[in-house]
Amino acid sequence: MEPYTDLARSYDHILNHVDYDQWYRYLRSIMFQYIEYPEWVIELGCGTGKFGAMFSRDDFPVYGMDRSIEMLRVAKKRAYKNFRIFCADMTDFRVSRTFDFIFSVHDTMNYFLTYSNVQKVLRCARRTMHDGSVFMFDITTEYNIRRYFDGRVTRYKTRGTAVEWRNSYDEDRKLIRSTLEFRHRDGSTAVEEHIQRIYSIAEIKTLLERERLRAVDIFGDYTFSPPCDDTVMINFITRRA
């Protein structure tokens, strides 16, 4: 089963520990720090649309893009006022206008398993930018996977569905494999497999350069401090080179 098929219905429950308000405040602070008069916003890999709804609430025209129809079905409930959603692949999309603030968070970039596909995402993102735009994205770290995921099994229960989430890390190939099994109230079951790849800062910087983007700042864990050995998420702030 494709990733985020059955997971879409349980996603917000599984992530109910996440402080989206604080996370949104950080995104806004980045946007206002690097863009003089931000207006148009787009999120690549918008998932269930929580950030889009927040930008819309604050009167920003915002678009949310995702490949998963099931995730967008959830996001549709939040797509009101200035928030619009559409289905597209991050490696191959075009939009009819440029945006001031482009962002992709929660390790979405780690789902692209080859340099070639990461470059395709960066190339598409660059096409959405003008010279004053900022593209912000994050990647998860090897420390995070080793410390909190490798070998871990987590179980959830939501809306009559039992979810078992197993994780393993192949250190040689830098691949994280997450297997989610869903057992529904009616007795049916489903399995999703999610695979992500760990990238170093040096690798990402090289790929940015190839696609004529430059990292104007690199932060750790949604702060304004540089990454360190125990950083969980690395945040790249980029502009057109």
Image (cartoon, grey):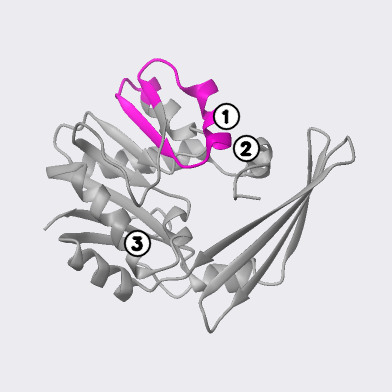
Q: Secondary structure at mark 1?
A: helix
Question: The disc labelled 3 sits on which kind of residue?
Answer: Val
Question: The disc labelled 1 sits on which kind of residue?
Answer: Val
For marks 1 and 3, the one nearer the N-term is 1
Residue 12: mark in rendering: 2
Residue 98 rendering spot, x and y as whole percentages: 18, 36
Which residue lies at the image location 28% right of the left edge and 42% below the top edge?
Answer: 102
Residue 7 rendering spot, x and y as whole percentages: 66, 43
Q: Secondary structure at mark 2?
A: helix
Question: The disc labelled 2 sits on which kind of residue?
Answer: Asp
Instruction: Calculate the distance from the C-alpha at mark 1 to the C-alpha at mark 3.
Output: 26 Å
| Circle 1/circle 2 CB separation < 8 Å | yes
- Along the line of sight, which residue is nearer the eye, 118 or 201? 118
Q: Which residue is mark 1?
A: 74
- Along the line of sight, which residue is nearer the eye, 164 or 92? 92
Lateral position of residue 212 relative to residue 222, left or right: left
**Residue 9 in magenta?**
no
**Residue 60 in magenta?**
yes
Residue 118: mark in rendering: 3
Query: Mark 2 against mark 3, which lies toward the viewer?
Result: 3
| Circle 2/circle 3 CB separation < 8 Å | no
Which residue lies at the image location 48% right of the left edge and 32% below the top edge?
Answer: 49
Q: Could you tell me which quadrant the C terminus lies in?
A: bottom left
Instruction: Calculate the distance from the C-alpha at mark 2 to the C-alpha at mark 3.
Output: 26 Å
Instruction: Calculate the distance from the C-alpha at mark 1 to the C-alpha at mark 2.
Output: 9 Å
For marks 1 and 2, the one nearer the N-term is 2
